């Protein structure tokens, strides 16, 4: 592999078969890692830095790793959806939901991030005031949209911007569910102050009389390992729940980090103890730089099968995400494999109607490797992961 050393800042083309039999030299690893850090930003907060020293599971999620330099996956799987009808920062692929991404940066950079061209590559324009106004007008103009998800980057990293958007959403009568996706609680638990919680709680106005007239605001938080649920993080979560806000927990299945039943059970135990409702277990997406982090989809099924004897409150919904939406997989699911250009894909008929996807998303055609079947539903092909290659160094 000595030619790696002559390829500055380029991704390394190598097949999984070659990878299995390759032993990188120390110089090659150093070179690859340097190229990775030139290509993708890295960074952690002081708090996260203190955790990294104590936990391999956390370190592997944040410290750039030389194998991120492999040529694999897609750079920007959802970029095309980020410019819906010429409005930067709004996405819609479902009838009832719109996604807003006002601010595209984070206080720390997860190596598996599927938005990495905007977060880790730093190409992250915020939504302009004009785009925010037009996005809110678009939502206000379609009474079918009852849910707005504000995600990022990290909305809690910019509470000032978030407040203005929440004020705008609160004026739209048919939006009665606001969700905020965040990982900021792990990065800076001290930022989750009483003042911030009170700000969020202002927009949580459930009606006990008429479900159509109230409005809920809840948080979707991402944690991948029980080591992340420290005393400081747990106290921040308790400040949130003390203000009457619901919290759903999302997990990304990551090789060498949480891909066994014991690790997930420990994390789910912490979720339940801290009033976090287990929501999604995501299969890690096929994004550039994630080859070494992706298990097979089947591995997630096997782990969930081991956990299936536990109470239903411990059962997140296992999904893999394609550009047309999520595909749910259960402990008994059977996967339909197809090989395309030597790569292993999972074929599935989605629950999404092709014409509806095109209409809601504002896109002209279905994404690559997607087609429609005779009933009009989208057929997707999702690139599987690899359990055999690349154990982390001890
Ligand atoms: S917090 Fe979310 S958006 Fe930010 S780097 Fe991590 S995965 Fe990406």
Image (cartoon, grey):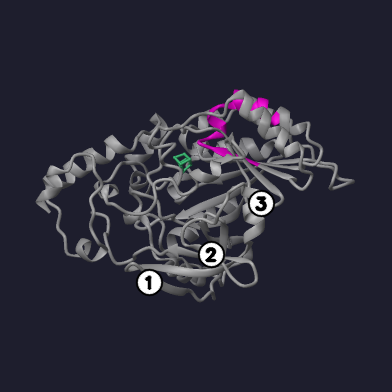
Q: As rendered, which of 372 and 216 lies closer to the eye?
A: 372
Residue 237 visible in the shown view: no
Q: Secondary structure at mark 1?
A: strand
Ligand 1 lies under 8 Å from the Cβ of mark 1 = no
Q: Residue at x 42, y 67 (%)?
A: 345
Q: What label sits on residue 371 in the rendered view?
A: 2
Q: Earlier in the sequence, mark 3 or mark 1?
A: 1
Q: Which residue is mark 1?
A: 339
What stretch of residues is rendered in magenta? 149-166
Of labels 3 and 1, the one closer to you? 3
Q: As rendered, which of 377 and 146 lies closer to the eye?
A: 377
Q: What label sits on residue 359 in the rendered view?
A: 3
Of labels 2 and 1, the one closer to you? 2
* Residue 117: % across, % down: 41, 40
Which residue reaches farthest right?
A: 209
Q: What label sits on residue 304 in the rendered view?
A: none
Tell whether 324 sits left or right of 171: left
């Amino acid at each position: 592999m000595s030619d790696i050393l002559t390829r500055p800042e380029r991704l390394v083309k190598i097949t999984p078969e070659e990878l299995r039999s390759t032993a990188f030299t120390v110089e090659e690893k150093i070179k690859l890692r340097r190229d990775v850090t030139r290509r993708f930003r890295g960074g952690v907060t002081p708090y996260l830095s203190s955790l990294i020293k104590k936990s391999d599971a956390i370190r592997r999620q944040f410290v750039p790793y030389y194998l991120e330099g492999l040529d694999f996956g897609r750079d920007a799987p959802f970029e095309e959806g980020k410019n819906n009808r010429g409005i930067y920062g709004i996405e819609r692929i479902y009838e009832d939901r719109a996604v807003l991404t006002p601010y595209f940066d984070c206080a720390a950079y997860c190596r598996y991030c599927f938005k990495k061209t905007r977060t880790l590559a730093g190409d992250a324009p915020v939504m302009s005031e004009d785009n925010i106004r037009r996005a809110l007008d678009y939502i206000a103009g379609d009474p079918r949209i009852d849910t707005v998800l504000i995600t990022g980057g990290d909305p809690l990293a910019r509470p000032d911007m978030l407040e203005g958007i929440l004020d705008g959403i609160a004026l739209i009568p048919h939006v009665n569910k606001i969700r905020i996706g965040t990982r900021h609680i792990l990065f800076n638990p001290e930022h989750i102050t009483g003042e911030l919680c009170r700000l969020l709680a202002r927009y949580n106005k459930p009606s006990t009389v008429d479900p159509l007239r109230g409005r809920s605001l809840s948080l979707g938080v991402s944690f991948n390992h029980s080591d992340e649920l420290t005393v400081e993080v747990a106290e921040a979560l308790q400040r949130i729940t003390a203000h009457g806000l619901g919290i759903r927990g999302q997990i990304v299945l990551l090789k060498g980090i949480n891909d066994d039943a014991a690790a997930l059970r420990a994390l789910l135990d912490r979720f339940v103890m801290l009033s976090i409702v287990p929501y999604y277990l995501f299969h890690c997406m096929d994004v550039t730089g994630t080859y070494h982090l992706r298990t097979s989809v089947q591995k997630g099924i096997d782990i969930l099968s081991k956990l299936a004897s536990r109470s239903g409150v411990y059962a997140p919904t296992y999904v893999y995400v394609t550009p047309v939406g999520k595909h749910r997989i259960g402990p008994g699911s059977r996967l339909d494999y197809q090989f395309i250009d030597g790569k292993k894909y999972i074929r599935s008929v989605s629950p999404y109607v092709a014409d509806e996807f095109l209409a809601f998303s504002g896109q002209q055609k279905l994404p690559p490797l997607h087609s429609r079947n005779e009933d009009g539903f989208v057929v997707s092909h999702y690139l599987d992961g690899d359990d055999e290659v690349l154990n982390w160094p001890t």
